[in-house]
Amino acid sequence: MENFRHQMVLQQIQNRGIKDKNIIYAMRTVPRHLFVNDDLQSEAYNDGPLPIGFDQTISQPYIVAFMTEVLKVEQRHSVLEIGTGCGYQSAVLSLLAKHVISLERIKELAESAQYRLKKLGYTNVDVINANGWNGYKQNAPYDRIIVTAGAKTIPKPLINQLANGGIMVIPVGKIMFSQTLRIISKDSNGNVNKEISLPVRFVQLVNK
Ligand code: SAH
């Protein structure tokens, strides 16, 4: 599996322009095949998303790398993720950040992701079974916020919970499975700037 993983990183990640060596290291390390069901393990290093049950998916490796690179995560950062799914993106982030809080609305997925992450040694991730539309006030503000489901509009509470100097990445689109990534940054005075990036296809972010 390690060989397949190294191939994946070279062909799908590095050859498409991801340069950050910490992200490359993280994706060479995290055992993606252990984040999917046994019967899909042989496909875990393919160039696409895979089903994880409950009509949800594990994201395409390149999209995980791209969104992570956009965030410019540093070792001192606290990160909020909305949409844990199987926990793969959380594991990648956990190797780059100080602490990751990840919210997942489907109880079974939240519980299995938390169990998997602890078992694999990603001890700085807390998965919380909650709807993430309103973020998670308890630990706000966050240096970085990543939403891994497609939102119709950008949830205001998430912008409020982004620290000054913070960066957020979120897929936004009115049509199902068709969004563009938005990169939202706050400067040191709290002024918000928005940019449009890649077109993507995420499952829907369920409204509160
Ligand atoms: N981050 C995952 C991909 C997750 S797929 C990875 O690493 O592969 C999107 C997930 O978002 C699904 O598990 C879905 O249940 C969850 N989700 C959708 N709307 C949500 C909401 N409002 N709050 C929390 N989780 C949500």
Image (cartoon, helix red, strand yellow):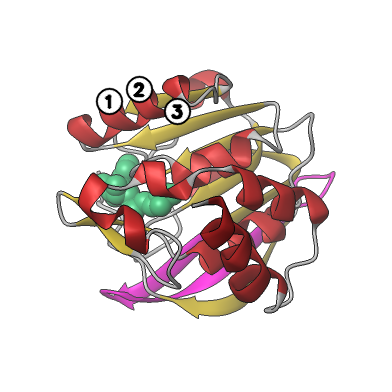
Image quadrant of residue 45? bottom left
- Looking at the picture, tell me which residue is in the foreground, 196 or 112: 112
Residue at 25% in and 74% down:
176
Q: Does residue 17 lie above or below 7 as drawn?
A: below
- Residue 53 in the image: state x and y as whole percent: 17, 50
**Per the image, is 169 magenta?**
no
Three-letter amino acid code of the residue under disc 2: Tyr
Q: Nearer the viewer, mark 2 or mark 1?
A: 2
Q: Amino acid at mark 1?
A: Glu
Q: Quadrant of residue 68?
A: bottom right
Q: Amino acid at mark 3?
A: Leu
> Left of 107 or right of it: where is 84?
right
Residue bearing mark 1: 111
Q: Is mark 2 within 8 Å of ligand 1?
A: no
Tell me the chief SS of the magenta region. Answer: strand
The residue located at (30%, 62%) in the rendering is: 50
Residue matched to label 2: 115
Identify the magenta region.
Answer: 170-190
In the image shown, does 196 or 103 lie closer to the viewer? 103
Name the mark nearer the viewer: 1 or 3. 3
Residue 117 tag number: 3
- Label 1 C-beta lies within 8 Å of the nearest ligand 1 atom: no
| Separation of residues labelled 1 and 3 (CA atoms) | 10 Å
- Estimate the x, y position of residue 10 in percent, counting from the top left: 67, 69
Q: Is residue 26 above or below residue 199?
A: above
Label 1: few (<14), some or many (≥20) within 10 Å? some
Secondary structure, mark 2, is: helix
